[in-house]
Image (cartoon, rainbow, N blue to C red):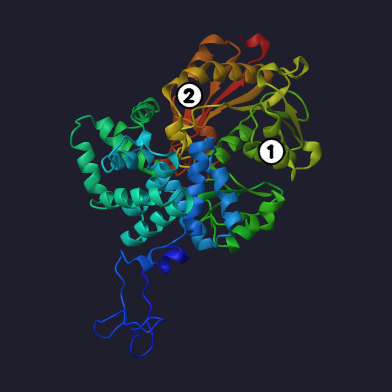
Amino acid sequence: MTASERGASGRGEGRGRPERRNEQGRERHRGAGGPRRFSQQAPSQRARAADPARLVAFEVLRAVSRDDAYANLVLPARIRHHRLDRRDAGFATELAYGALRGQGTYDAILARCVDRPLDRLDPAVLDVLRLGAHQLLAMRVPPHAALNQTVALARGTIGAGPGSLVNAVLRRASEHGFEEWIEELTSATADATEAAAIRYAHPAWIVRALRQSLAAHGRPVTEIDALLEADNAAPVVNLVALPGLGNLDEALEAGATPGELVEGSALSAGGDLGRWAAVRGGTLRVQDVGSQLVARAVAAAPVEAAGERERWLDLCAGPGGKAALLGALAAERGATLLANEPAEHRADLVRQALRPVPEGAWSVRTGDGRTLDPELRGTFARVIVDVPCSGLGALRRRPESRWRRTPQDLAELGPLQRELLDAAIDAAAPGGVVGYVTCSPHPAETIAVVEDALRRRADIEPLDAGAALDAVALRPLGAGHAATAQLWPHVHSTDAMFLALFRKRSSGAY
């Protein structure tokens, strides 16, 4: 509950006999003794301006809706701008992310409470309604506080007229609890996919895609509800200390817990991590454990490439999380890393991420990974290619993505993914290792790409990716299936990272 919300009830207790007259001496309370209790509708008790935590959440939703921004990039800046304390920052985070995750479900509920199609509402009003619906139906906010503060938010940011509309719509929404709304919305459909889409706030095509993904990677499709629930859970912040450069001391002293899947990792409740010196210095970083595992697996897989000093390549390095971890591992082993990124602004982020790593251990190239210089081809002992993908494996961290992606994205990304994998294989030296990585479990982006490469190319052989992950994990993961490996939010508490490993054959082996 925010600071302003704590005063929303308007209860003021005096000492001894309660004061019954206002400043003009008029008697305002004729009841028996005891503190005065205002009604929820008392005009004098209505909030007149948005409280900072809700304002931050609203600004995040507006940036996402209006500017196609990413919540994880906007939210920290707005929290700092409004100088929220830790408690209010946590409230703003839960409110913004929860409203974004639940958007589809809340829109279906709101459509039953509004006298016009939702697309005819002012987008800013719709964002306010989504925030109000999440507070009423999914947070531990008293209903009167949710209504009062959300109406104040509308009045303070949009105007008095929209404030009245917001008040009326949210009162209708508050007439039922979440489960009652779900029952009402799903009672007319016998389609399990459509019902799951409403209950778990995923587009129906993503529900179908994730069910197909479970089957393709050897898991029971009955896990679909658990997977969708995991997508909606607020993710814990994953930290990594760069090997040989950083440590977890500061994080552990602040209450973080050591990671259970990979060494050098920790789990934090979040907050302003920028206050830690190690984070500011770049030796302690935020990185999903799944991302850490696949990077370490590529770095640890046995190679047969010649050369006293290994050369490593991160072909799609932006924004630099895996590159920083790989660079630190390379520096420990006397290897060098080339981080390639086609976009200049993302290449700058990669340089920033690699800044703590000794300069002689890395370099950054700005350019299309499919057009590496001829002299670089066939020279790298290790290549990782984390290809652009649908991001269906990171929906819990990027809640707005589920409403932006379409099935057409899969068709458009497929050729690029295959071309980048070909470029990665071409860059590998004979005996070298190539790691193909996606943050998506969809078979069109994972198994299909791998099988296609194995059919087309005689110069590669598959390696056991599940065994490679287990070799760098602190406990067996059980992620392997048909030589590839797939991590899952509901099983491993990671993003749904996919890994396939190949060895480049020598020219005489095929």
Packing grade of label 2 (10 A; few <14, some 14-19, many >=20) is many
One can see residue 496 in this view: no
One can see residue 213 in this view: yes
Q: Is residue 348 left or right of residue 38?
A: right
- In this picture, is 129 found above or below 195? below
Q: From the top left corner, tell me how far across and down residue 322 is, in percent.
A: 63, 37
The quadrant in which the C terminus is found is top right
The extreme bottom residue here reads 16
Residue position for label 1: 349
Q: From the top left corner, tell me how far across and down residue 104 is, in percent.
A: 35, 38
Q: From the top left corner, tell me how far across and down residue 96 is, in percent.
A: 46, 48
Identify the disc placed on residue 482: none
Q: Is residue 205 left or right of residue 468?
A: left
Q: Amino acid at mark 2?
A: Thr
The quadrant in which the N terminus is found is bottom left
* First-in-chain label (1 vs 2): 1
Q: Is residue 489 left or right of residue 328?
A: left
- In this picture, is 437 found above or below 198? above
Residue position for label 2: 446
Q: Nearer the viewer, residue 477 or 1?
A: 1
> Mark 1 or mark 2, which is nearer to you?
1
- In this picture, is 433 found above or below 323? above
Residue under the image location 63 percent in, 60 percent down: 250
For marks 1 and 2, give the CA distance: 27 Å
Residue under the image location 24 percent in, 32 percent down: 192
Q: Nearer the viewer, residue 143 or 416?
A: 143
Q: Amino acid at mark 1?
A: Leu
Secondary structure beneath label 2: loop
Packing grade of label 1 (10 A; few <14, some 14-19, many >=20) is some
Q: Nearer the viewer, residue 8 or 316?
A: 8
Secondary structure beneath label 1: helix
Residue under the image location 33 percent in, 42 percent down: 106
